[in-house]
Amino acid sequence: MGILFALAKALEARDDDTASHSMNVTKYAMLLGRQLGLDDEEMRILGQGAMLHDLGKIGIPDEILKKPGDLDEIEFARIKEHTLLTSEILAPLETSNYYSSIARSHHERWDGNGYPDGLDGENIPLLARIVAVADAWDAMTSNRVYRAGMSEPVALEILEKEKSWGQWDPYLIEQFIKVIRKETESSNSYSVFEKAI
Ligand SMILES: [Fe+2]
């Protein structure tokens, strides 16, 4: 656990945006995991894998990682490498397989048009599919230097519309919408997150 936290801290030191993003994605992924009824061990792996899912960005040059405008094809290809870089960084850890499959597959798409392996549907590991939904949600709702985040009702509407769009597991989207609605009502989203990490 100490080593995993140290790695998360290393990424935080490199890029503030990614740091808060990783913590938010962890929170949302665990809320969805709980909704799906994952057991304690799966929840532990999900939490730790979500925290480290973008760790490979530590190996992407600043001019690409922090570029405010659109990326060209070569730069985008470089960004895509963060999925594989994470696996390489974690490889010396005995338990790295648990986390690296989440990192490797969190940009795969339900319709098979994602990267790096072009997996589709349930061929994408479940925990990576969960992180993909949490990742999209945080990207939509959080503020970035170059744009303000969407409000939750607007982001929920988009998720609802895009259930059949092909990017995410439609069942997970359905469950995630329930989670966010529940959270908005009770606003105690940190309890499950704190317990499991
Ligand atoms: Fe990513």
Image (spheres, grey):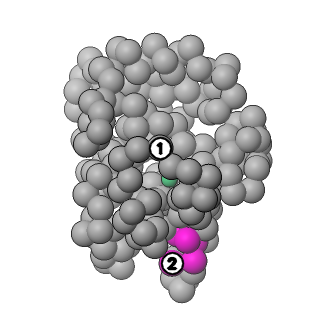
The answer to the question of whether label 2 and label 1 lie on touching residues, with beta carbons closer than 8 A, is: no
In the rendered structure, which amino acid carries the disc numbered 2?
Answer: Ile
Residue 96 placement: quadrant: bottom right
Q: Which residue is mark 1?
A: 70
Residue 104 placement: quadrant: bottom right
Residue 145, horizontal then vertical, whole percent: 25, 42
Q: Which residue is mark 2?
A: 89
Label 2 Cα crowd, 10 Å radius (few <14 / some 14-19 / many 20+) = some
Task: Tally the numbered discs.
Answer: 2
Secondary element type, mark 2: helix
Name the N-terminal-most of marks 2 and 1: 1
Asked whether residue 178 appears in the rendered view, the answer is no
Residue 161 drawn above or below residue 100: above
Camera-nearest label, 2 or 1: 1
Asked whether residue 144 appears in the rendered view, the answer is yes
Along the line of sight, which residue is nearer the eye, 44 or 77? 77
Query: Residue visible at 51% across and 21% down?
Result: 159
Query: Residue visible at 61% across and 21% down?
Result: 163
Residue interval drawn in magenta = 85-89
The alpha-carbon separation of the residues under discs 2 and 1 comes to 27 Å
Residue 2 drawn above or below residue 43: below
Along the line of sight, which residue is nearer the eye, 188 or 104? 104
Residue 159 drawn above or below residue 54: above
Query: Residue visible at 63% across and 26% down?
Result: 171
Image mark for residue 152 = none
In the rendered structure, which amino acid carries the disc numbered 1?
Answer: Asp
Residue 167, horizontal then vertical, whole percent: 64, 33
Residue 141, horizontal then vertical, whole percent: 34, 30
Residue 117 placement: quadrant: bottom right
